[in-house]
Amino acid sequence: MSAAAQRVAAAAMHAGTSGPDPAPLDASSIRVEFPILWQSVHGKPLVYLDNAATTQKPACVLDAVDAYYRCDNANVHRAVHTLSERATVAFEQARAQVARFVGARDSSEIVFTRGATEALNLVASSYGDMVLRESDEVVLTEMEHHSNIVPWQMACARTGATLRVVPIDDRGELDIEAFGNLLGPRTRIVAVTHVSNALGTVNPVAELVAMAHAAGAKVVVDGAQALPHASVDVAALDCDFYAFSGHKVYAPMGVGALYAKRELLDAMPPWQGGGDMILSVTFEKTLYNVPPYKFEAGTPDVGGAVGLGAALAWLESLGIERVAAHENDLMAYAQQALLGVAGLRVVGTAARKAGVHSFMLEGIHPHDVGTILDHQGVAIRTGHHCAQPVMQHFGIAATARASFAVYNTREDVDRLVDGLHEVKEVFG
Amino acid sequence: MTSDLRDLYQELILDHGRHPRNSGKLAAATHHADGYNPLCGDKITLYLDVDGGKVRSASFEGQGCAISQASASLMTEGIKGKTVAEVLALFRKLTATVTGRDDDAALESSVELGKLAVFEGVRQYPMRVKCATLAWHTLRNALEGKDVEVAVTE
């Protein structure tokens, strides 16, 4: 058994009786668990700092997916044979793992989706179409990812509702007073990101939820950038919906989940039709299944769900508080190091940030920065980060973005800074 | 700097990226078109003064990376005085060269790349090819009268 598997098994055995190891994380030993990071790019050991786009996968997640397909693969919730039973158990165990990880009261509050985008589209289509009427309002923020903007524009176009946008300030923080002023009797839905993918801003979601609820609105949280970095408790946040992607939290691409309060899922109409989401079908009348299955038409990505369950168990075994502490240390170290580069400006300077530093180098376009860093073996993201309204706010077309994960080290930050000096030399 | 990186960021490209030639609006423009690269947000508006089947003058406004700015700058220099047919042949040769597309007719055409050969190194950087071709796709749209269509390098 690998070290990671032993740790996961130990953590599972001791769950509830003893907390995770309180010692600080040793990121360099965690890095070893990620086979993809063992390679060189352009002759230099890979430094992967594009984690807000997608994280790499630890061996235990790859093994779990592989073992599922080698040993247990069958369709779920259908046949009576042994493999189908094993696949169904594995799928539902993954759902229970997700529910536990985000603090849901019950597994039935977790709907598997292709990712955060599909989860947000599900809410906008099903819940949005159910409650929105002409002259109703959907409130979202200037820092949303396109995936938490476009589904609402589409819902507004279908229903005649109106979008209202909460502005951000020049530090990249939400204008809470403006948010309060936008809330009113017509507000039906508030859609807000937990952590900004372009700026790293951590929003005070619990406070926003309380304000929205006082105005009678439901709150949809895009948690794609939050879940990898901090302990998330949907019950404590009291949000109505929470969407996230597996691939940003060390799980495979193609799977994610929507948390929704059970009473909302009960009231919402199905979104997509097909197998698994029905109880009975005749040409006269179809009876829908109960949540979460009502929202899971067709064969799901069972292997992906198994990988997601394994990834969350792995994170739990590390201790999400230790992960957060390590990443906070890295963020602070990176901020200091970046500010030491002459001509570098950090875009997004909120008091609370997670995972992301966006920046500009004076006189050098982010794409050129990205290509030259790649030549140093350092992978970062450059562009608008699917958050064009954020770019418009700051009057820029693109930023360079370094984003961190649990396997990143201070040495990775040093390599980034060395690379930036090389960029400046090329353009000097 | 490693040599293959120098293939991309040649001095000529860095110079034109820093100091684009023919920058600004062209008062006497007979043709114009907009280009946009949604991947990186590069934008260009191209202006042409075409008279008697010849490009008399060309200029551009825009923002973007060093490659895209240098490409627009060197393109506007390179097409001045050429006939529309020569410019379109140059378009085919340049785009075939930087994309590595199997287009023998274009690659063997007698039209000379001249200074534009500096973009040959872009072929080694598939993610950057669109930076080099945006201005050229915008040029073709302008010449073909597709000024209502935004060129997107596809």
Image (cartoon, rainbow, N blue to C red):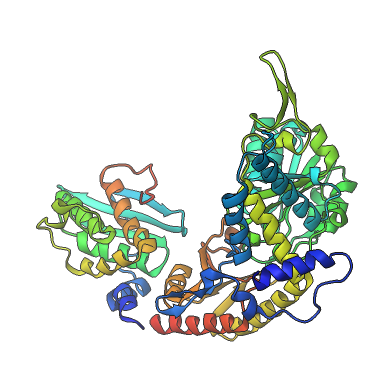
> Left or right: A297 with respect to B72?
right
Q: Percent from the top left, x then y, of residue A359?
A: 57, 72
User: Does residue A186 appear in this view?
Assistant: no
Q: Residue at x 56, y 63 (%)?
A: A395
Picture coordinates of residue B138, whole percent (x, y):
33, 51
Q: Is residue A391 left or right of residue A309?
A: left
Residue B30, horizontal then vertical, whole percent = 27, 48
What residue appears at the point 86 percent right and 49 percent down from the top-left corner?
Answer: A105
Residue A20 visible at all: yes
Does A267 sit left or right of A226 as displayed?
right
Residue found at the far front of this picture:
A82
Name the outermost residue toward the left.
B110
In-front residue for pair A292/A52:
A292
> How many numbered markers are drawn?
0
On-image quarter of the N terminus of chain B: bottom left
Name the foreground residue: A326 vs A317.
A317
Give residue B81's quadrant in the image: bottom left
Q: Is residue A130 above or below residue A352?
A: above
| x and y, in percent, of residue B6 in the image | 31, 78
Residue occupying image coordinates x 30% and y 68%? B21
Q: Residue furthest top?
A: A284
Please determine whether, in this image, residue B131 is positioned above or below residue A209. below
